[in-house]
Amino acid sequence: MTDKKKPSGPHEVDVQHLLDLLNHNSDWIWEVDAAGRYTWSSEVVTDMLGFTPEEVVGTTPFDYMPPGEAERVAGAFLAIVEQQIPFSGLVNRNQRADGQIVVLETSGIPLFDEQGNLRGYRGMDRNISTLGERVLQLETIYDTTPVALCMIDRMGRLVMANKAMIHLLGNVEGNINDQLFSTLMPVCWAAFRRDFALADGGGEISSREIIWAGNIYYIHPVPVHDAAGNVVGLSVTWIDVTERRQAELELANANEVLQHHAQHDYLTGLYNRRYMDECLTMAIVRAYQQRYSLSVCLADIDYFKDFNDSKGHQAGDECLREVACALSSVRRRPEDSVSRYGGEEFLVILPRTDRHAAQAIAERLRESVDALKIPNAASPTGYLTMSIGVATLEGNERLPEDKPLPIIASGLIRQADNALYSAKNNGRNRVVASLEPEEN
């Protein structure tokens, strides 16, 4: 009687079929213990890494990675083990037995014993070398770029953050992922919630600047959509513009100083002639447009050359500063302006002021200088005095189209100068108003 081989039972067939599935597919299946050492490996590892399952058991995944890569992936895997959670999409470089580099995508689930203690992970690796190198390069660029980058989901969790972002947040301890942004940066979370609402409605999210930890950041949020087109997160770029803003502030301050010097007399601090010529032109335009009178006072210090020659230039400069202060103190309205028009000559522009009102103001100007009682031996009074000529433009007609503004302005100054000349010829220390009408 010939012995016949008994057919395998259903259980034996199922086990063999399962082993065939594990050992003859494109993915490498494995198990590791709590220390990360392989305890079982499918035969696919031989095609993938060039090592047999027997050679792999007892080693760790990091034994097959270049040093820098091993350190990076070990850090990521340690954070996963501490949380005892499933993971997927962990992209990593590995070195085959023949020295070639392959890029794998690793996924895994935690395994627990009967007491609920973590005993290891079961997972699989997929060879994504064709695409993986590009993914790793992008990950490296993302992680090492000096610009802070992060992604926030709708619940406010920080899904991704590069090194610059972690530094911006103050080098947060522990795993940065899944931390609540509302806790990390509460001052910004309300604005990001508005960004989500705007993105849901199809609106465009605007960039903005914020101040965080003493620095100024220009942030640019961009909505992230899933396959169905739903907004699932915000990708946010943070650019530190503190130094740029400081430089802009310093430049603005420098421009302000330059503008001040361009408009003001270096000695007295009053407006200079160049700027006042521009102001007078604009004042004339407004006077004609709004139909009001415009007056100017041209003032000159009496016997100043004799004072300067006898006292010296330093005393002369100090005298000019005191006179400038005295004239400025008489001003009552912001639109009135005083300038050093040249040498010891000063110009006062008085919008909305007719001839009689201008004469009264000019008299107060003269009295303010008289009150200084600066000794001047050349003056009959024994102290410094001032003569003033007043001229008025009656802006009750339209601006002449055939007469350039500079001509109108120079004509008004000429009238004031003639009145000043008359004040000088009539004994000085007095105010004379021009009765000559401005020709239109």
Image (cartoon, rainbow, N blue to C red):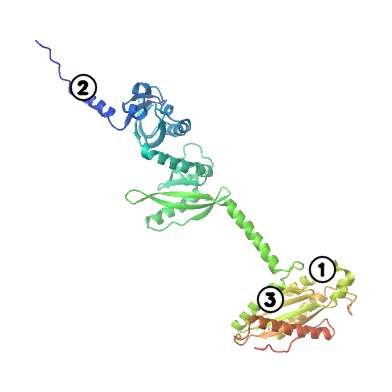
Q: CA distance from mark 2 to mark 3?
A: 107 Å
Q: CA distance from mark 1 to mark 3?
A: 23 Å
Residue at label 1?
A: 317
**Could you tell me residue 90's position as x and y percent?**
39, 36
SS of the residue at dot 2? helix
The foreground one among 20 and 232 is 20
Q: Earlier in the sequence, mark 2 or mark 1?
A: 2
| Residue type beneath disc 1 | Asp
**Could you tell me residue 272's position as x and y percent?**
72, 71
> With 139 as the anchor, is 380 left or right in this view?
right
The foreground one among 402 and 150 is 402
Q: CA distance from mark 2 to mark 1?
A: 114 Å
> With 136 as the anchor, is 396 left or right in this view?
right
| Of labels 2 and 3, the one closer to you | 3
- Image quadrant in which you'd find residue 18: top left
Residue 277 has which mark?
Answer: 3
Q: Earlier in the sequence, mark 2 or mark 3?
A: 2
| Of labels 1 and 3, the one closer to you | 3
Asked if one can make out residue 261 in the rendered structure from this viewpoint, the answer is: yes
SS of the residue at dot 3? helix
Q: Earlier in the sequence, mark 1 or mark 3?
A: 3
SS of the residue at dot 1? helix
How dense is the environment of label 3, judged by Cα within 10 Å: few (below 14), some, or many (20 and up)? some
**Could you tell me residue 430's position as x and y percent?**
81, 82
Residue at label 2?
A: 12
| Residue type beneath disc 3 | Asp
Residue at horizontal 39 percent and vertical 22 percent from the top: 58
The foreground one among 229 and 117 is 229
